[in-house]
Image (spheres, coloured by chain):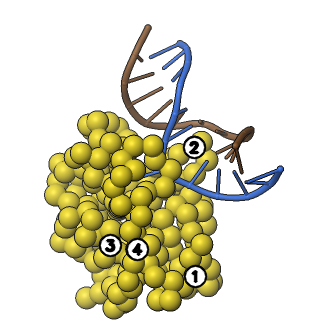
Chain colours: A yellow, B blue, C brown
Amino acid sequence: MMRLKKDYFAQSTLDVAKDLLGKELIFREFKGFITETEAYIGQGDPACHAARGKTPRTTVMFGPAGVSYVYFIYGMYFCLNIVTEADDFPAAVLIRGLHLSQPENKNLNGPGKLCKHLGITRDHNGLDLTTSEFFYVQDKGLKPGYIATPRIGIKVGTEKLWRFIANEDIVGVQS
DNA sequence: ACCCCGATCGTA
DNA sequence: ACGATCGGGGTT
C-alpha cells in the first residue's frame, strides 16, 4: 500500500516535514510531488498558531494526525497543513510547494498559490487524508535530498531551520 | 464591540 | 519595498 496512513503522520513533525518531500499529494483531479514544507510545533514554537493554546481555528491541530488544517490568511489566501504527532499534541506540516504532474505539468511554489490553483478552501479544513477518497498522500519511492532554512513570513521562531526544500534535480525546478 | 496584524503574493 | 484584503483572537 503506497498511501500514507495515520502511523506515518503521527511521527515527529520534523521527521514528517522532511520525509514528505517527494511524496505525491492527490487532491481531486490534481496530482503532484511535494517540493517544500515547513514544520510548526505548538510546544515551544511561538510561530505556531497553536502556541498559545486551543482556539476555534487551531482545534484541528490538537486532533488526530493525518487531518488537514486549512487556514485563511492576509484576507485572501488559504494555506494547507497536515496535522502530525499524537492527539492533544498540536503540530502540523505546512505544504509550501508542489510540482504538479496531473492534469498539467506546473510548478506551484508558495502555499497561497498552491491552494488557489487546486481550489483548496476553508471547506477542506478538518478532512482526514488517511481515509478520504479524493484527498491523500502516497509514497512513489522518491527520496530527494533537501536543504533546511528559516521559515518564511514569520517574525518569531526565525532561529529554527524548519523549512525544507527538495533538491531541484529530483523533483523539478524551484524558485 | 473594537482593533491590530498576519505561516502571502504580485507589482514597483 | 509595499499595498491588497479580511478573519482571528486578544483586549476593552
Location of mark 1 (residue): A173
| Position in image of residue A7 (x %, y %) | 18, 71
SS for callout 1: loop
Which of the pair A173/A160 is nearer the observer? A160
Local crowd size for mark 3, using a 10 Å CA cut-off: few (<14), some (14–19), many (≥20) = many
Judge depth for marks 3 and 2 and give the one in front: 3
Chain at numbered mark 1? A
Counting residues from the N terminus, which is met first, the one under dot 1 or under dot 2? 2
Amino acid type, callout 1: Val
Residue for badge 2: A74
Numbered mark located on residue A18 in the image: 3
- Whichever of callouts 4 and 3 sits on the residue coming sooner in the sequence is 3
The residue under label 3 is which amino acid type? Lys
Residue at 29% across / 41% down in the picture?
A51
CB atoms of marks 3 and 2 within 8 Å? no
Spatial separation of the CA atoms under disc 4 and disc 3: 9 Å
Residue ID at (42%, 58%): A150
**Tag nearer the camera, 4 or 3:** 4
Residue A155 visible in the shown view: yes
Q: Residue at x 19, y 67 (%)?
A: A11
Q: How dense is the environment of label 2, judged by Cα within 10 Å: few (below 14), some, or many (20 and up)?
A: few
Residue receiving disc 4:
A147
Q: Residue at x 55, y 63 (%)?
A: A110
Q: Where residue A175 sits: x, y (%)?
A: 60, 72
Q: Are marks 4 and 3 on the same chain?
A: yes
Report the mark closest to the observer, 4 or 2: 4
Badge 4 element: strand
Q: Is residue A78 left or right of residue A39?
A: right
Q: Quadrant of residue A101?
A: bottom right
Could you say where residue A165 lies in the image, as x and y percent from the top left? Answer: 44, 73
Q: What is the C-alpha distance between the residues marked 3 and 2?
A: 27 Å
Foreground label between 1 and 2:
1
